[in-house]
Image (cartoon, rainbow, N blue to C red):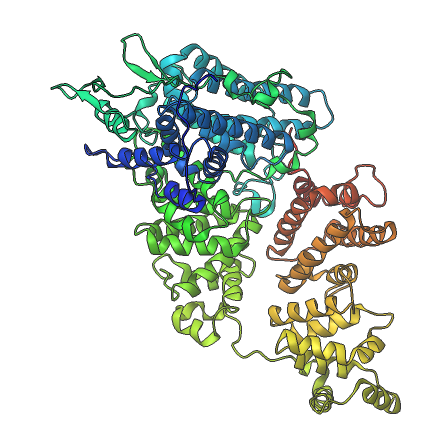
Amino acid sequence: MKRGREPIRYGGYYDEVRVIHELLDLPESPESSEERSDEDAVSVVAHQLVGKLPHHQYGVQQVVVDMALSHPTKHDVLAYLLSLMCRKGNYGRDLCKGVLSEVVRTTGSSIKSGLPVHAKIGLRFLACCSAADVLEPKTAASIMNMTVESATKAREKSKTQDKLANYAFYGEYLVYCVLCALPLAAESLQRTEKEMLASLLEKLGAYIAGRPKMKNDSLCLYKGEGYPTLANVGVGGCGAGVAGQVDWIWAAYQSDGAHSPDFDWSKVETINHFEPAGAASAAAEAKQDGVEMVVDGNGKAEGPAEGGDEVMNDSTTKNESGKEGLKSITEEELIPPRHQKSGETVPSFYFSQETVEKVDRFTEVVAPYCSFLPKQHTRLGDHDLNQVLIHELAADSLTSLATSPQNLGKILVSLPAGGLQYTAVLAEAVFSDMLQLPSQHFAPIFYSGVISDLCLKMPGFPKYMSACVRYALERVDSMDLEASQRLAQWQAYHLSAFQFQWPWERWGWTDFPQRGESDRRRVYIKDCFVSLQRLAYHEHITKKVPPELHPLVEAGRVEPNKRAEGDEGEKKIDMMSSLIFKKRSAEDFLLYLEGANETPKHVVMAILCIGGKSFTHMRTLLKRYRAVIDRYAKDKPLDILDILFTTWSKFPDKFMMAFTCLLEEGILNDVEALEWSAKDHLGGEPGSLALLTSRARIHWAVVESSLAACCNVASDRASGEETRRTYEGGIKLFWSRVMGSLGKGRGGEGGWSSFALQHLQCLARRHAKVLKPLIAAGDGGDDDAVSACQDEGARRAVQAGLDCFSFA
């Protein structure tokens, strides 16, 4: 039997958890010291992993692949680790081929499936492997060229096909991935494949020059000076979403001159790859492998010592000067053996028709950069690309490590930035992700935890964090309404977590109560305090904040409003409450009401007053006295919401708690709640809606909750046809009433009408996919609520929200 080129080795015990921790402990970037301690640590891990081969190759391969796709800060060190393993014989090289093949497969399938979670990160890792000479630079350039060609094909199809936005977003995301990965491989490409680099940059420039622009500014965080009155609503050509991110990155390329193939990429400070080990390090590695090297007087390795067995190795090659170098993995070697006969090419980056149908997943996957701070604070080093690379690295870390918050803060504090102070850039990256439109990637509490963690672990972060809020509030008039509400909710949590430490007086925030009721600054602080009262007692808040802001803090004593029915009504409510405390049954109440010839109104008010203590109280009472409530709400379900609003109108939290319990018990549904929110304002003139004439905090909360529920049912194919029609009818009725009132000029005074339009635009944008065919079909029919509106500004505002993902 023919003997193999390498002796059979037995890897022994394989502890996957230990391997994972060893990889996590590796440094993200090389130290600028002569001891090369980082490189030595990587060499030790490489030697240990090679010792596990070939018996544990699959296990090691999967760990490395998972690490590469979930820890973007480890790309450089993992690429360096693979280069060391590739030098240690054919087993190590086979492992490297397996890792790169799996990364290419995962990256291509992520793009094809319309789930681009790993597409950008995988392409970035391949670029790092190219810089470490593990992957042939020509292969990396070929993969990027294929990606740009697919984007170009999508752009061309967008000009002739009906689904213009689908093709355009598909192309935008592919170009975005290439722009983020190219800087990490550009230096190696410039050194070995300069013509391919020039061709790639030329294709990128041609694509960006001929791409379509967004139809309007609905996805922009800042809308412009005309936003308070929606004067410039619907203006196109702005940078928003993934298209805006591509514009920002390409502008950095042009500012630095990186769009030219002659740009010196080695000068970009944040691109700091591990350098190949020297001869002394090679001797140390050979000694670990059991081969004693002869070293001359100058410290150069001459070869194996006499009597030593030289291990045959096909993973290295000799360059023109006769020195041994790493044999990079080529494009053909990335094809898995099972696909070689079928003729399948390496990457699955070619244009995919199926992906276009899933383009919704590309539209919101990118959180575009938004400028909060002056340029002098976010300028890193001598190149604008430094800011781009750190921003994207922070964004990738937020996305990939969201399920591991205990490690996320530690990683964000120590990003590989080439020694640059990137605190301001990190603050902007976190706020850009938190305020992304039309929706956040994660729950609000996630961002609160991340920012709090960074404030504790990063000394300079609180200064830039508070500066972001300060500059954002200075431009709040042009800031998207939904984004400002998110910011207010976050600040409430932050104040409660850090003992209300905030420079109120120094920044002039104490003047906000003197502004008009509908002024965005006053509304912002009011919203912040409303959220804050869910987290802290009223007395504690008033002790910590300046006295000038106390008028914006709601009353401290939480009690229901029983006096709406007069003194006689209040006495009846108290009497019914005493009977409820005595646990009288629903039948007893029905007998009493029938004998006294009274309506159950006061009983229902007593139930809502007592149930306001907690969810448990409310649910228990609604179940116990369901018969009484049904008798009152029969044929008039909206009346119970009127009673609830009268009882808890000053305390939105109590109202929403009771409202949620009423929905849970089936006493009313979301269609009825949506209809109630668009009723005439209580006590106002006919046709004047509370949504349009005041802040209407409770009404807007009901609209947001019930409209989302109605849209979910209307878009759920599992729902019955009759059920879907019922909920679609509720959606149409709400929008026709609101748009009709706006068309008749019944908006509020003092800016509340503009506030309502901004809110309606946010709702239309959030549920555009469901709402557009229901309320803006464009056929001029009775159901076309947007076209039927007589107010041109209102039509344009809502239509801009519905067309938020459209291209001009």
Q: Residue at x 70, y 32 (%)?
A: 357
Of residue 674 and residue 624, the one placed in the foreground of this image is 624
Of 680 and 440, the residue lying toward us = 440
Judge whether 391 appears above or below 471 on screen: above
Residue 473, can we see it?
yes
Q: Residue at x 86, y 72 (%)?
A: 634
Note whether 243 is above or below 411 in the view shown. above
User: Which quadrant of the view contains residue 341?
Assistant: top right
Q: Nearer the viewer, residue 560 or 294?
A: 294
Name the residue furthest top.
320
List x then y, in percent, for residue 642: 74, 71
The residue most toward the left is 297
Displayed quadrant of residue 349:
top right
Where 111 falls versus 752 (above or below)? above
Left/right placement of residue 740 relative to residue 244 reads: right
Indicate the position of residue 307 as horizontal and vertical percent values: 23, 19
- Percent of width and height locating residue 360: 65, 37
